[in-house]
Image (tube, rainbow, N blue to C red):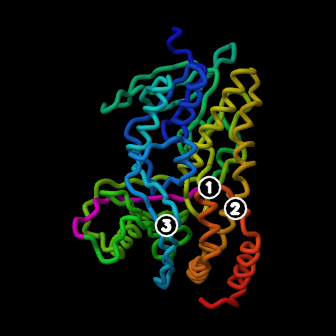
Amino acid sequence: MNSQNIYEAVIIGGGPAGATAAQELARRGHRVLLLDRAGRIKPCGGAIPPRLIRDFDIPDELLVAKAKCARMIAPSNHRVDIPIDNGFVGMVNRDEFDEWLRQRAASAGAERRTGTFSHISREPDGTAVVHYLARPPQTKGEGTPETVRARCIIGADGANSEVAKQEVPGAHKGKFVFAYHEIVRAPEYKPAGYDATRCDVFYQRQVSPDFYGWVFPHGDTLSIGTGSADKGFSLKGATALLRRMSGLDRAETLRREGAPLPLKPLPRWDNGRDVVLAGDAAGVVAPASGEGIYYAMLGGQLAAEAAHEMLATGQGAALKLARKRFMKEHGTVFWVLGMMQWFWYTTDRRRERFVKICEDKDVQTLTFESYMNKKLTRKKPMAHVRIFFKDVAHLLGLARV
């Protein structure tokens, strides 16, 4: 095997997590290979909060829309508009956004290859060998078997991560919601109530028995979709219903996409030796909201930092730092959101009360401050107290709906 096929780090998967990890490691001077399979576009609403834009230097030209309001729609069709005061949530198209991130990683020095990961073997001295099927872009067929050596491997190959299944204990413990969406062209003549700066979120059993449906603006297009862990629930049928409800059933469909979304961080992200996970492969999509881009990019950055320490020290235990640092900063948020989804999304009666709670200005302010900045805000302690008692009233059925 020639020296051209020896890398300090091989990143498998070129989504936001993998591309961010590749950029970070290349920026630190490591020889990096970014391996990504062709034709992959993940179903995603495409929302990115201000903290992501700020922390990861996302240029304004990548934003195809700027959402300034979220509309929550209850089973009774009661609607609550939550304005985003003095700010916006950026909307991106994942095909363009992900490719820009990969190109940025290449500009930092990462080498790009197109192919599908197969497995990892190890040489007598313990060096990892990554096996994959090379497939040049825009070509068909199974591809040509290729191998590269790596001191460290970052698995960022999605919710059904082959790297995780093969290398990381406990990877089978993931919890998933299956998501499906359709990208449609924004109609020339807009239906009544259409707002290109508003994200609509439907909390209705007919749209999803345990998650939610969405209609998100993307400038000239829209993402319309839903998700559910119920394998017997028709996601395509629910999406068709959403389109009719929104007056978009006749809009031109540009593409359809579906994939599992993990809603619980895996109990372990590394093999203690030379492999660490990032993004969906590590399970870091937020419960209740389904938000994943920010957490994927942060996870990629933390995986790269842990890999850098492992490469510098030769200690595989350093890879544990990726999960440790992520959970220290965001573990509480994931727990709170998980409990919220488990309780509020189970029946239409509870969904109705959940939307009703969101009429409260304290709830709106604290929710968006936490979402925009990715921290549980500690401002206005009395507002937290008021929210607690209001929540209790709704839980006990003492509040009017």
Q: Is residue 279 above or below residue 310?
A: below
Tell us which disc is closer to us: 1 or 3: 1
Local secondary structure at mark 3: loop
Is residue 263 among the parts visible in the rendering?
Answer: yes
- The picture places residue 394, in percent across and down from the top left corner, at 68, 84
- The stretch in magenta equals 176-189
Residue 84 falls within the magenta-colored stretch: no
Sequence-first tag of 3 and 2: 3
* Residue at 55%, 25% in the rendered image: 26
* Residue at 44%, 69% in the rendered image: 200
Say what amino acid the circle numbered 3 marks.
Answer: Gly
At label 1, counting other C-alpha atoms closer than 10 Å, the crowd grade (few under 14, some 14-19, many 20 or more) is few
Say what amino acid the circle numbered 1 marks.
Answer: Asn
Most foreground residue, 44 or 257: 44
Most foreground residue, 3 or 131: 3
At label 3, counting other C-alpha atoms closer than 10 Å, the crowd grade (few under 14, some 14-19, many 20 or more) is few
Sequence-first tag of 1 and 3: 3
Is residue 347 among the parts visible in the rendering?
Answer: no
Contact? badges 2 and 1 (CB < 8 Å): yes
Local secondary structure at mark 1: helix
Q: Which residue is mark 1?
A: 373
In the displayed structure image, the side of residue 328 where residue 161 appears, left or right: left
- Label 2 and label 1: CA atoms lie apart by 8 Å
- The picture places residue 23, in percent across and down from the top left corner, at 53, 30
Residue furthest top as drawn = 2
Q: Which residue is mark 2?
A: 377
Q: Which residue is mark 3?
A: 232
- The picture places residue 163, in percent across and down from the top left corner, at 59, 35
Q: Main secondary structure of the magenta part?
A: strand
